[in-house]
Amino acid sequence: MSFGTVITGAEMGVIDANATALGVSRKQLMESSGNAVAAAVTDVAEPGDHVEIVAGRGNNGGDVFVAARFLKQFSPRVTLLGQPDSITTDISRENWNALQRAEIETRTVTDSMTFDLDDPDVIVDAMLGTGISGALREPVATAATAINEADATVLSVDVPSGLDAASGTFADKAVDADRVVTFHKPKPGLADLDAPVEVADIGIPDGAERFVERGDLQRLSRPKDSHKGEFGEVLIVGGGPFTGAPALAAQSALRAGADLVRVACPNAIAPQIQGYSENLIVRSFDGERFTPENVETVLDLAAEHDSVVFGPGLGRAEETLAAARTLLADVEGTVVVDADPLAVVPDVETAATLICTPHRGEFERMGGRSTDGLDARATAVDELATELDVTLLVKGPEDVISDGKRTRISRTGNPGMTVGGTGDVLAGVTGALAATLDPHPAASLGAYVTGRAGDQAAEERGYGLVATDVLEAVPMAIWGE
């Protein structure tokens, strides 16, 4: 087959979860996957062949538990590597139990010494799925060796066991498949196989990739062994004519999970900004507004942070915009550009990675086309993102996010969020996420999380919400149900 867009195992997990959020359950997808596996086995097996299915304890195993029900003509035997009570998902366990009730032959192997193959003609490899990496462990390692040594056709499900679906690399003694049936899109590494790969359509709706949904939250985690600084240090550069905007952005970055947030602002307003919260760390520079004389100081601060949010409350004085041009030309790393400095982005060549968060008017002033309708708007955002080589998060009734390669839509948010300050919350949330994620997913999640926080605030307070209501709701928007 011709390999186009490949998708990692982690990304596939996001898409599966988004499909569920859109109403297509993982159980439905597993049934479709199992049917696709059964069809692939039927293609390679001859009448009277013996089919051996070797399954792991995850959803990959669940797929072949379903498949076994459609392969009765081959009298399949299903070997589970592990105990049934350690099957990791409820739907896989349900399908394992269905095999028992249907009197399909099953066995369990927990000790590699007891693993054997009953001289099969076709072996279905579903031991490890797309979420597994590293060296093969027992009893999988022994089973993989036996499968490779068997005189049988080997069909691997999704990826051959031992293929890392993030990096596309193969573990030592990975399964050497004769054929692969994978789901939805190809995975990294499959193009390197000397074997045919079938990509099965299992009914995932296009919206699971187009729309930002709850599944995207799987990109975020807080492991128990986390340490200070692991979730990013963010610098907010703002203030001058306004003090609330940088304070809102900074507090929102903290609420979105950044470990440390500092505010670089004119010393004339530093006390006011500090007064908004004891959680803020303020690093002031000379003067009443951001000017070219302050650029070197801010660049030095920016170099010490994982991401920068540039713009909240800076104003549009000519000397401030001149300083913005210089800073953007010289800064490195990831920068979220918001508010007035957006106007200078098209004029600047920079090595920095920019995430720009304009509303519709700012988007058009940056060179974007005026359009009607969501599809036309998405196309226009894609075009400008490509032209400027930036990630755009264009705010509106539906937020459109594009880096010129991928365009997504976030549908959270409500009319109550037209109140002033919610854009500063969005910039801070996006800055926090950009400290640990790539720009496009950071911007996509920034839009989704901020809109979801606004929806939760509106549910509690109605449309009389203010920006601080939204930032207070950010943690539950990320970590709540």
Image (spheres, helix red, strand yellow):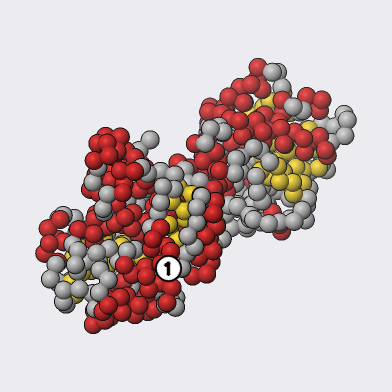
The quarter in which the C terminus is drawn is top left
163 displayed left or right of 177? left
User: Residue at coordinates 20% horizontally, 73% vertically from top-left?
Assistant: 289
Q: Find residue 129 and report its image quarter.
A: top right
Residue 165 in picture, x, y percent from top left: 60, 52
Residue 253 in picture, x, y percent from top left: 29, 55
Q: Find residue 322 and report its image quarter.
A: bottom left
Residue 93 in picture, x, y percent from top left: 57, 27
User: Residue at coordinates 34% horizontally, 63% vertically from top-left?
Assistant: 338
The one nearer the camera, 309 or 66, is: 309
At mark 1, the secondary structure is: loop
Relative to 221, does residue 111 appear above or below in the rendering?
above
User: Residue at coordinates 58% horizontally, 58% vertically from top-left?
Assistant: 167
Relative to 252, does residue 367 appear above or below in the rendering?
below
The one nearer the camera, 422 or 318, is: 318
User: Residue at coordinates 69% horizontally, 54% vertically from top-left?
Assistant: 190
| Residue receiving disc 1 | 366
Relative to 423, does residue 200 appear above or below in the rendering?
above
Which residue type does callout 1 highlight?
A: Met
Residue 425 in picture, x, y percent from top left: 29, 53
Relative to 341, does residue 76 appear above or below in the rendering?
above
Q: Can residue 441 be seen in this view?
A: no
